[in-house]
Amino acid sequence: MCRILGSFAAGADRPDPAELSAASARQRHGGPDEHQVLRGPGWALGCDRLAVTDPCGGQQPYRLPHLPGILAVLNGEIYNHAELRRALAARGHRFPDRCDGTVLPALYAEYGPAFAEHLDGMFAVAVLDLRPGRTQLVLAVDDMGMKPIHLHHDPEDGSTRFASEIPALLAFGGVRISPREDSLDTVLATRTSFSTGTALDGISVLPPGATALVRPGAAPVVRRRGPHRAAPVGDTQDVLRHEVRRLATADVPVCAVTSGGLDSGLVTALAAEHARETDAPPLHTFHLTYRGNWPGSEAAHARSVARRTRTVHHEIALDPDELPSLLTRTVRHLGQPNADPITLSTYALFRAVRRQGFTVALAGDGADELFGGYDRMRAALAAPPGADWAAAYTDALSAAPRLLREHLYTANYRAHIADTGSAADRIEQELRSAEAVGADRVTAMTALETRWRLPAYHLRRVDHLSMAWAVETRLPFCQPSVVAHARALPAAARTGKRALYEAGAELLPAPVLRRPKQPFTLPVEAMIAPGGPLLDTVRELLSPARLVLGGKVRADRVGKLLARQLERPNRADAQALWALAVHELWTDVVRGMSIPAGCAAA
């Protein structure tokens, strides 16, 4: 697990070492163990390494003496690296260590840009081919988009730059960007940017399961690969058990995140089972709660899972007074606005994981998307024929429903969104189009959730905020065999997570199985109520003078929304206010990151 970066252009100029150093410094929190950037005429390739597999080997960029001219860097883990190494060794390739990424130059030499089709894992890979007559850069990410690559192409000089995190990309002097005009509407309508775009003009993200080919001076050509060939064997519990056992094996200490719900509970139970059966030390589990009396606490359920699975449990009690100071840090690490208050909880949780000495954490993200666990999915399935289920579903994704957004916008901004279209419009159209060509609603919703929302909203949050503390998060539900198994199930079995409840029947406490679904999040309605620890921060970010200057929302109507929240605290109003505040803070943070490389700060 690492952070990677690079630059590629036509010509003989070598990239500025100050820019490269600044870019590396901005994402070094995710790779504190080793740093190296190589550069040459028209190119640079670098890595900040978090040593997980073969900590004493695996120096990046990867180079093999018998393959001069091929360089590679990796962010992530390749779980089938041992099998690949054996197959490549049989073809005559030689390797200096057993690090997973060391196989990449040889794999590329054998298969060219199709090398990523042979990888099983979570990965963002860059391969630079400098052999005479073959010069090109190849970028690839895993099928679920667990590991990101952010791109900027300058059409004027033909250069392409990339990095694992947006702040690092902004340290390159040639990357000149500005917030997208529709970024506020996108945050309110979908909570964060979906698709290949970001909240910044000029920066894109490689979509899940994609490979980009970059020739000198040309724009990246992106293509989607076919899904990884996976052959799941057995029922849901068997398939998940197999993946948990693979992912629980590492050369560094491994723990699990236990929210108290079904998904993380299943991962915890199977990882604890694996530890017992292999005579390994007991599994450690982590749960975040808040000091004081706050609604929605899952601590008792997490403790119940820990007792049942016999783990060493760590209950982290975060002081709510610390939340305002965490907000700017989480926004900076994410690089673009994410309207879910869970970001603060996630950041604090992985800080505790790292401070307790763990480098790898197992988590349950991805289950709801694959197995139909969201309330909005159940509501859409229950909608009668003729009902506009797609619009209701899309509104349920939002931080502020369509009517509220349009009420808050200024006349000019409302007209602009009407002319250009909202992210919500595109989601509704995709859902209706899928149904029109014969897809059932479960399949249509699952496809949208896994292809767009899961990578942008959940996986990016988990990746950036765990790596902010140099913790590698592994996600069994996002493994190809689990994904293939879920997609092959009948619609009824992947509705309401029925298959997962059956898998957990003998593994988890009955109260955990019976409890209603509750997301791991921050009780934002209480946190910005009168006397709440985040009220002053939100009030400052949404000051009338500031909003009038922005020109996108009416300050008087935002003020009335805040007054209503203070009079009758509720989740819906608090979520809309939080999204507005996060976007305002993000605009400040991103301006501070867009500074010359010589002035860049880590």
Image (cartoon, rainbow, N blue to C red):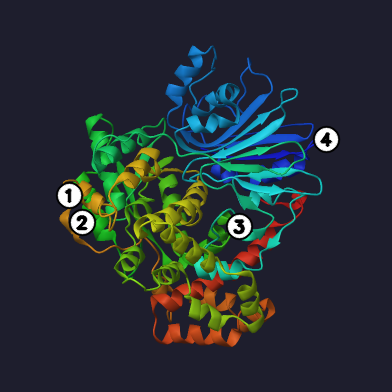
Residue at 36% across / 41% down in the picture?
484
Residue depicted at 61% across the width and 75% down the height: 418
Q: Any mark on residue 513, and which?
A: 2
For the residue labelled by badge 2, is the local secondary structure a helix, a strand or a loop?
A: helix
SS label for mark 3: loop
Residue pointed to by mark 1: 505
Q: Secondary structure at mark 4?
A: loop
Q: Residue 11 — which label? A: 4
Hey, which quadrant is residue 527 in on the image? bottom left
Task: Give how far across and how far down residue 136 sits, in percent.
Answer: 70, 32
Q: Give the answer, above or below, for where 206 lies relative to 547.
A: above
Q: Residue 472, how many percent across, how many down?
A: 46, 42
Find disc 3 in the rendering and name its residue. Answer: 198
Do labels 1 and 2 touch, CB within 8 Å? yes
**Between marks 1 and 2, how big is the CA–CA gap?**
7 Å
What is the residue that sits farthest to the front in this orientation? 437
Amino acid, disc 4: Gly
In the picture provided, is 567 more to the left or to the right than 594? left
Amino acid tagged 3: Thr
